């Protein structure tokens, strides 16, 4: 299959306006569409948020019989749909089903004065996450003709974030390889990276699957190591009550400016592992950025060939402390940085221990 990247992500949430405020005030997203009973969408209310090329749909159930209500009751706020952009949604759907995918919604055409949309959905190999196939004849036209009403949003001088770089998903122990195999078989993705991280407190195995054509669909899949003390992946699986999306990585063109703005907007960031920056120059070599600025911003760095990548992670602001976010800048680097995978794991472990200390002190 050939995808043209992530069309949008849909999150099921318990409190719509509150969830939208996190994205709008924290990251600078703008509300550009609205759907609900008044627009023909029964049983739920949704907002469309946009920033750069990123589109997020936030959906709150209005009745107990809506499937979003079941999702939120089990998982809390979380990502339900990772939708792929494709040139032929019906063909992608039937191809995936032929390969063994479970159909959720058959292809359906939606037409309006500003564009035509074809949409179909299959189950993903991960928990209750689904993948929709989205075909648009006017990419900048109506988001969902006949369902969403456009909302005129004030233009910003500069978008902080550009696009969805990748998503990280936590898996049930022992299911990593079968999930990799399923993404290869059902969607034509290929494994590109593998990393195993072990600390004195826990560990994880991770593999990355993505489009070989570089179309923009990329998943970091992680499972906890067995026989270890419960760690961050176990924490997610317990609080989320199953496998699912742990974090969304947003691409930026200026991570130091992004960190400055995020802090200005009071978005909490994860601390970097202790001692991380003392060894940084020897490990990654010369950088365009000042190491002290990176330290001040808790920005992680990893070298990849002639390039490097820079990453920073937010703390979770969701009730169950499951979903969080990554900001990543790539400088001629397409990988994930083995050292940064370990550093992220250690950072989240530090955050878990910090919360444990606060809870015990209280």
Image (cartoon, rainbow, N blue to C red):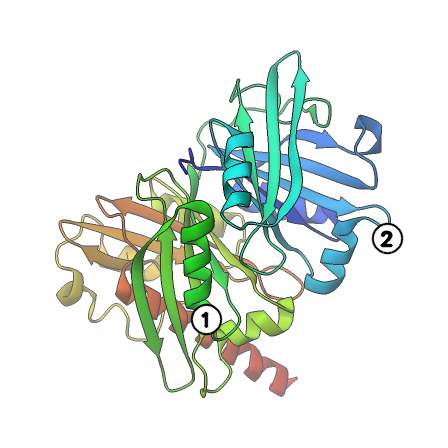
Query: In this orientation, does residue 313 appear?
Result: no
Q: Is residue 113 left or right of residue 303?
A: right
Task: From the top left corner, tell me how far across and down residue 62 is, in percent.
Answer: 84, 46
Sequence order check, earlier mark of 1 and 2 = 2
Task: From the top left corner, tell me how far across and down residue 105 is, in percent.
Answer: 67, 40
> Relative to 249, is 40 above or below?
above
Cα–Cα span, label 1 and label 2: 32 Å
**Which residue bears the numbered disc 1?**
223
Name the residue nearer the viewer: 15 or 190. Answer: 190
Name the residue nearer the viewer: 18 or 87. Answer: 87
**Which residue bears the numbered disc 2?**
64
> Relative to 255, is 273 above or below?
below
Which mark is on residue 203? Answer: none
The image shows a total of numbered marks equal to: 2
Please tell me which residue is depicted at 28% across the width and 75% down the height of the picture: 275
Query: In this orientation, does residue 357 appear?
Result: yes
Q: Is residue 312 left or right of residue 62?
A: left
């Amino acid at each position: 299959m050939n995808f043209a990247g992530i069309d949008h992500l849909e999150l099921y949430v318990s409190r719509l306006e509150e969830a939208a405020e996190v994205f709008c005030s924290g990251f600078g997203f703008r509300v550009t569409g609205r759907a609900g009973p008044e627009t023909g969408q029964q049983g739920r209310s949704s907002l469309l948020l946009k920033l750069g090329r990123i589109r997020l749909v936030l959906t709150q159930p209005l009745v107990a019989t809506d499937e979003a209500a079941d999702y939120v009751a089990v998982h809390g706020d979380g990502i339900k749909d990772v939708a792929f952009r494709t040139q032929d949604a019906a063909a992608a759907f039937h191809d995936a089903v032929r390969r063994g995918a479970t159909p959720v919604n058959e292809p359906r055409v939606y037409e309006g004065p500003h564009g035509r949309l074809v949409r179909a959905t299959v189950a993903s190999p991960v928990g209750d996450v689904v993948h929709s196939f989205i075909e648009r004849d006017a990419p900048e036209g109506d988001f969902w003709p006949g369902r969403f009403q456009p909302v005129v949003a004030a233009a910003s001088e500069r978008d902080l974030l550009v696009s969805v770089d990748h998503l990280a998903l936590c898996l049930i122990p022992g299911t990593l390889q079968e999930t990799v195999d399923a993404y290869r078989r059902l969607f034509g993705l290929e494994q590109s990276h593998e990393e195993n991280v072990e600390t004195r407190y826990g560990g994880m195995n991770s593999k990355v699957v993505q489009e070989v054509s570089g179309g923009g669909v990329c998943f970091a899949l992680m499972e906890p190591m067995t026989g270890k003390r419960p760690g961050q992946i176990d924490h997610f699986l317990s609080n989320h009550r199953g496998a699912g999306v742990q974090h969304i990585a947003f691409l930026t063109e200026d991570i130091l400016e992004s960190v400055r703005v995020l802090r200005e907007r009071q978005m909490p960031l994860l601390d970097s592992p202790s001692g991380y920056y003392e060894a940084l120059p020897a490990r990654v070599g010369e950088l365009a950025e000042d190491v002290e600025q990176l330290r001040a911003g808790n920005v992680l760095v990893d070298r990849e060939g002639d390039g490097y990548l820079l990453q920073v992670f937010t703390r979770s602001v969701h009730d169950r402390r499951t979903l969080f976010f990554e900001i990543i800048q790539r400088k001629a680097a397409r990988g994930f940085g083995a050292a940064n995978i370990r550093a992220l794991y250690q950072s989240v472990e530090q955050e878990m221990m910090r919360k444990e200390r606060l809870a015990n002190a209280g």
